[in-house]
Amino acid sequence: MAAVVNANGSDAGKTDGEQTMLMPPPPTNPMVTPLLTDLYQFTMAYAYWKAGKHQDRAVFDLYFRKNPFGGEYTVFGGLEECIRFLANFKFEENEIAFLRSVMPTCEDGFFQYLQAIDCAKVEVYAIPEGSVVFPKVPLMRIEGPVAVVQLLETPFVNLVNYASLVTTNAARHRFVAGKSRTLLEFGLRRAQGPDGGISASRYCYMGGFDATSNVAAGRLFGIPLRGTHSHAFVSSYMGLDEIVDKALLSHDGLNMCEDFISLVRSWLIKLQRANSLHSTFGETNQSELAAFTSYALAFPNSFLALVDTYDVMKSGLPNFCAVALALSDLGYKAIGIRLDSGDLAYLSIEVRKFFCAIEKEFGVPNFGKMNITASNDLNEETIDALNKQGHEIDNFGIGTYLVTCYAQAALGCVFKLVEINNQPRIKLSEDVTKVSIPCKKRCYRLYGREGYPLVDIMTGNNEPPPKVGERILCRHPFIESKRAYVVPQHVEELLKCYSPGDSDKPRAELPSLREIRERCMHHLEQMRPDHMRILNPTPYKVSVSAKLYDFIHFLWLNEAPVGELQ
Amino acid sequence: MAAVVNANGSDAGKTDGEQTMLMPPPPTNPMVTPLLTDLYQFTMAYAYWKAGKHQDRAVFDLYFRKNPFGGEYTVFGGLEECIRFLANFKFEENEIAFLRSVMPTCEDGFFQYLQAIDCAKVEVYAIPEGSVVFPKVPLMRIEGPVAVVQLLETPFVNLVNYASLVTTNAARHRFVAGKSRTLLEFGLRRAQGPDGGISASRYCYMGGFDATSNVAAGRLFGIPLRGTHSHAFVSSYMGLDEIVDKALLSHDGLNMCEDFISLVRSWLIKLQRANSLHSTFGETNQSELAAFTSYALAFPNSFLALVDTYDVMKSGLPNFCAVALALSDLGYKAIGIRLDSGDLAYLSIEVRKFFCAIEKEFGVPNFGKMNITASNDLNEETIDALNKQGHEIDNFGIGTYLVTCYAQAALGCVFKLVEINNQPRIKLSEDVTKVSIPCKKRCYRLYGREGYPLVDIMTGNNEPPPKVGERILCRHPFIESKRAYVVPQHVEELLKCYSPGDSDKPRAELPSLREIRERCMHHLEQMRPDHMRILNPTPYKVSVSAKLYDFIHFLWLNEAPVGELQ
């Protein structure tokens, strides 16, 4: 593919140091300030402050209730952005001035308090980013002064929601496309705003995509970049006479072809006349031929052409092949073609046949193996349908459906109070899926003999951890009859400390995007296949310890509306 | 509603100068740079440059093909962001260095060219932001050197796509809710990333919302802010003994109530005993009562409580009323309640009855008229269903479905070449909806006798404009049989010049967000009602002049795949 490069530059000779120089750290988005929150976080903070409750030590869980896209798994994204937000949390004076204007009846002392706060006393525990995660299990547990932690609710949920959703969407596309295909994220123009586009590129790469078209994201995160040309490029040429400089040096640098256009033309005639190709094309479109020739003169090492501007079989494909064969004469190897409309399964098969016939007819090695990219409104379903029909597509370029998460545009993360001043709190609801799991908790993933994760279990913070080889009762948090004994072969504690507050706990490191991507790929491969399948996947089990189960139900009875008992 | 304020501060005495000081201009998002584009824009630019075609004068149209949300209208948003992008368009040296590393085979002269370019030669014509717009008619026409204008494609489409989509979504919510309801945008936590949230607030306000919960957006754009408290606030209180300072000065400042809690308690007992209320509640939840009391002590002037943490009718509502009546004793007027779960139609009606019964029983004027806000997963459909059932909701708080555009997460704007070097270009497709309308065009809206817009018409750039009172043939661009004569009572030219390039055309002004919002409201009101209705709306007609029609079909024949003619 043309300009197929790693964002750090494709030169193998480059040192790591040079690469780092080219890739700056993600810039601080000036919109991501402590004001990026809901007004009610400030009105609540004031009410806490007035009541002298603002320093009360609170524990909140950030979690989601249901896996997206009709699936049974989710990939956790957005943690690094939350931790960076926390580290930079500080009000500017002009922000305080704005808040004063918004809340004119509030006492001065409150604004002095706001001006002074930071997140030094906030502890954050989280599942590592890129992990496969499940409903109800906290992705993050945030502890600290209630007024401060409340101010984090909105930005944290905002930063995790879309990141996790689009990472999961990318992972689902990777799953359905299979490991051998190349997945390209082409969503910037359809993303929800500029940093929607940048986040999409970052998290699609995390979820298993290979490259993006988004140059800014390539630069920020070191994601490989891809791109060739558009339909407009093709129709911007009127004909071959527009090309002034027709010379092309051969790949080995030894021969100068003075008239590359004539070489292309001669190949086009050979293609028309070759009986073995069963060619049905007459005169191909000359705008298109000029555009392809011009593009090949600019990128002879990486010629890839979009062949559907006029008609794939009657114009785009023969034009492409004529240019590719002319390049081949000069020792260059073309990359392949892109299809952006029509019946992609059928066209890709016809294109492959044509490539193979040329390889045979003209004895051009590997011409049949050239790359076919498809890119027209693809999504998980259409890729699945293409696979079922059979196709010859090597690369999928995916935009709108991927980055907007069209199939389900929101994950619905929540941020719930589970403890305050060491008192467990529960949020009840008539809808049992909305009842929160109270208490500061520890969370474990239990693995079975075959290496698959079997179940996640939440326990009270002070319960002894589950042990390898021991029989552990895992209970559904709300349904009494659902329970199972598990003997784990491996136990993994899920929540790591990413912000120790004023404790002396060691701080878990924030890995690079590439490392997070590897974690994600590894986690996805580790899952039992029936949890992953598209149709009717088996739900992965999420449980609580026997002790936590009893405590939840004790609280539930005590907190339920008292009026009911009359 | 608590803390109901304009973002500029609610103090009527403030001068405009002070307001301006508090509201900074929108910051430049460091992610919105010329690198925020697809890689292929750079590879094409290089191919143009190599071919000496980069300065060719090109004309592109930015338009969409289909109205979103099953409707027959769209509101145009995002123009100001495009114009700001254009004005700041300039490559930094480190950006050029990055591009060199991405395209290592490109010649040095190309990067020198990139380093030097800006948009001084780019002309932009656009329909004013906030206008009601229709498929196929260019929202923007961009003219300039082909290589530069191509670089603008991705950011412009990105900036217009989501802005127009979410403005339209907001306008649709306003239409179904009716003028008399207050619409609050509560979407920040579910938006697609931080500036997804900020854009959502900006464009929902443009589309007719009254306020947002998003403090950062309130500050940036002067949008009124709203917010009170969450369920976590309620469950963070254990009981009334947590409230240390129980004193509250009366509204007139003349009397100090030393024990507001006792006053609240006495009202709760009165409520329980009042036969006329048909009270069915026993002991209400004490956490909730404490939280409400604490909130009222902090915001006695704007007390609004979320009443569904435990049970609306048995706990939340009586607790709220006890606090509101105690406030009333001290001369304060509570705002009302918020419902965030359950059957909103039923609950709002029951709450209203209870309020009215209290007004009657205790002679508290206007108690029955208190505000009822609803906010649980609302969208266009649920509001329509609530209206059909009947309800007593005054304010709707809308989040997820609004800001993610859940019903349709992308608009699908395109950016098509229509002319290069004064040669018209057409993009053909087997799908007729994807055929572009060639030529540099002028666009007009023709109004009928009743003041409604009748039809939009596109003409060639040099055709004389349609005149009031003259009979004009309006043709469907592609379907021969669809045509009509129109005699307009008023003719409006749609495209204004926002960037004159090196021409001396006057530059149209960028109005304030509030002015754009007014344009939008005015345009929506002006539309014939059958275009606006939710079920089976009538499509608004978009046409071309007879001359342009003929020319399109002449080009079509000439550009169609030549192979077909064999």
Image: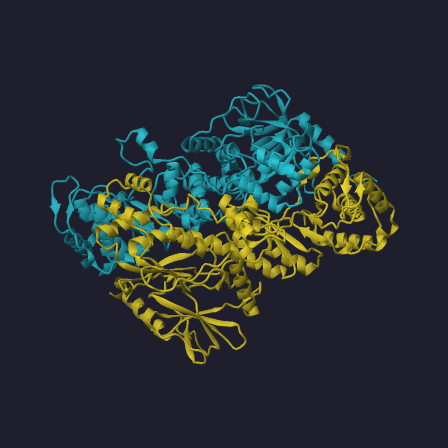
Chain colours: A cyan, B yellow
Spot occupied by residue A469 in the image (x, y as percentages of width and height): 57, 19
Q: Is residue A454 above or below residue A561?
A: above
**Image position, residue A429 (x, y; %):** 69, 41
* Residue ID at (54%, 35%): A90
Residue A366: x percent and y percent? 24, 41
Quadrant hosting residue A369: top left
Q: Nearer the viewer, residue B132 or B478?
A: B132
Q: Position of residue B281 (x, y in %)?
A: 82, 44
Q: Quadrant of the C terminus of chain A?
A: top right
Q: Quadrant of residue B295?
A: top right
Asked whether, in this view, residue B128 is left or right of residue A466, the answer is left
Q: Of B235 and B363, which appears nearest the observer?
A: B363
Q: Is residue A43 left or right of residue A510?
A: right
The quarter holding residue B189 reads top right
**Is A48 above or below relative to A237?**
above
Pick the front one: A264 or B364: B364
The quadrant the N terminus of chain A occupies is: top left
